[in-house]
Image: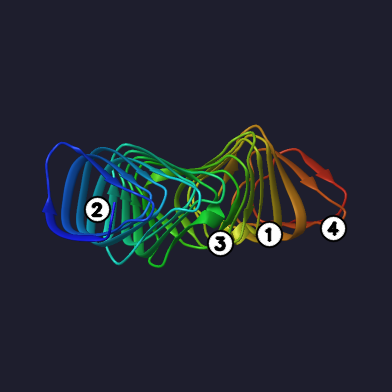
Amino acid sequence: KNNSSVLNVSGNGNAVVDTSAQAQITTLTQDTLSNSGTLTVDKLTIKSSAINNGTINNKIDANINSLTNNSGAYISGSGNLTLSGTSENAGMISQTIIENTGSYTNIGTGTLSASDKIINSGNLITNASSILAVNGIRNDNKLTLNGGILSGKIEGSGTTHIIGNVSNNASILQTINVSDTGAFNVGADIGNLTNRGSVTTNALYLTGTVNNENSLSLNDGTLSSEITGSGTTNITGNVSNNAAIFQNVNITTNGSLTVGAKIGNLTNNGNVITN
């Protein structure tokens, strides 16, 4: 309850830091943690659940099973944070490296930032504007973006799911799945694309396979990836295709298509150049 400095606290108990308390602990290992004050710790291990309504300054390593970081709460410092259970964040989390192996959700204005990188091998849900890593995000499982603008690159063996209105100003070099509620405005290179919603892009940004089952709009550039699926490719700018478009093609009044490979059924309200 009062200001205190302790070397080591361990066991299977419940650690509580009250609102007015400032605690400095070298190593803290407990079953649960409830923090409403200021907790500074070198090494933190919470085996069950942690609720943070105050400030946690993690200096080296923090391993938390399930975390609830409420609005106005902070987890900061130069340490590394690993989350392994079900976690929700409506506050601010800022660490050197953040690793999620469980299920993590940014809620409302909750932000997740790393001065090095974010690693996800679990299920991570966030607004794209609320996640930032200086050296990028490695997603090896499921990353869901429900809105916002992405400013840090994504790579890894997983899949990025777009379920809201999302723009990317950094590359997403992995499989992307746009749901029927997704609207994806592409502003940098992307990997394999499956689209059931709406995608707008420069053709140059399509570096992998393209399966379009709804609406894909090309606003510029040269297409080098085949487009398949039951949807429609809309040409809204100056576009050339060096790869086939195996679906309906709609050229708008502002569109111009220089045909360099096979295309499907064509509706032309703009300009077509073909041999």
Label located before the other in sequence (3 or 1) = 3
Mark 4: which amino acid?
Asn
- Proximity of marks 4 and 1: CB atoms separated by less than 8 Å: no
Per the image, the residue denoted by label 3 is 188
Q: Which quarter of the rendering shows the C terminus? A: bottom right
Of badges 3 and 1, the one in the foreground is 3
Q: Residues within 10 Å of mark 3 (few under 14, many from 20)?
A: some
Give how far apart the Cα atoms at labels 3 and 1 are: 18 Å
Residue at horizontal 38 percent and vertical 66 percent from the top? 135
Q: CA distance from mark 3 to mark 4?
A: 23 Å
Q: Secondary structure at mark 4?
A: loop
Q: Position of residue 1 (x, y in %)?
A: 29, 51
Q: Residue at x 85, y 58 (%)?
A: 254
Q: Amino acid at mark 3?
A: Ala
Image location (x, y in percent) of residue 147: 60, 48
Mark 1 vs mark 2, CA separation in Å: 51 Å
What residue did someone put label 4 on?
A: 254
Mark 1 lies on residue: 240
Q: CA distance from mark 4 to mark 2?
A: 55 Å
Instruction: Give the mark, 4 or 1, whose residue is nearer the N terminus.
Output: 1
- Measure how far apart labels 4 and 1 are at the Cα level: 14 Å
